[in-house]
Image: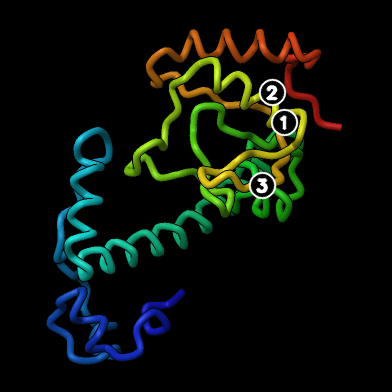
Amino acid sequence: MRLEERYREFSQFNAVWRTPARSWEEFGTIGHVEAPFFRMPPGGLNDALEIKANQANAVRAAFFADCDAFVAVVAEAYFELCASAIRAVDPHLIFVVLANSRLVQAGEAANLPMVHEVFADRAYEDDGSLVSRRKPGAVLHDAKAIAQRVVRMVQDGAVISVTGKVIKMRTDTVCIHGDTPGAVGIARGVRQALKDAGIDVAPFKVN
């Protein structure tokens, strides 16, 4: 979405971005705009502080919502370039894509064989996206609960969101983040749970 579509008037936009411009036309001629707010690096206490700061300041929250929307636009173009680059090297290479994401559309457009990836140790929003690491509960740590969750993901072809919503999601491969505390134990638990459920763990294979 263009900034003009997010704000009815330029004055509303400028109340957030605080540029020296007086119109959309003049804003288009400015080569550099100083960010009116500073975002702390993600992780730990910083995430909680960011949430608190945005809750206390609606203008700050609006600015970072604009930034996140811009990142999404850039990411979409980046996904398309990645898929095109893979196809240029070898159209038979397997493209690992985040299930239910824009990566899937990029892979389809490039006609690449794809493997859809779900995350064992990350929470999902109701729209199927991953919960931001800036939010509490974004990363899961209970090895037993994670193992049971993965089995359900594979058997049902779906994930359960943070609110309990069932989201259909193709599950070809499961990611466990190596930097998650206890990752090795989580991986062992997931593999054993899959085995106990009669689900084979095997290399990628695309029909």
Closer to the observer: label 2 or label 1? 2
The answer for how far apart the CA atoms under marks 1 and 3 are is: 15 Å
Closer to the observer: label 1 or label 3? 3
Q: Amino acid at mark 2?
A: Val
The residue that appears at 65% across and 53% down in the rendered structure is 106
Q: Look at mark 2 in the image and give the residue it sits on.
A: 151
The residue that appears at 77% across and 14% down in the rendered structure is 197
Name the spot of residue 36 as percent of width and height, x first: 14, 66
Q: Earlier in the sequence, mark 3 or mark 2?
A: 2
The answer for how far apart the CA atoms under marks 2 and 1 are is: 12 Å
Q: Dot 1, crowdedness within 10 Å: few (<14), some or many (≥20)?
A: some
Look at the numbered disc 2 and give the secondary structure of its residue: helix
Locate residue 15: give its quadrant.
Answer: bottom left
Locate residue 115: give its quadrant.
Answer: top right
Q: Amino acid at mark 3?
A: Ile
Q: Look at mark 3 in the image and give the residue it sits on.
A: 167
The residue that appears at 61% across and 48% down in the rendered structure is 165
Q: Dot 2, crowdedness within 10 Å: few (<14), some or many (≥20)?
A: many
Front residue of 164/98: it is 164
Look at the numbered disc 1 and give the secondary structure of its residue: loop
Q: Residue furthest right?
A: 207
Q: Look at mark 1 in the image and give the residue it sits on.
A: 172
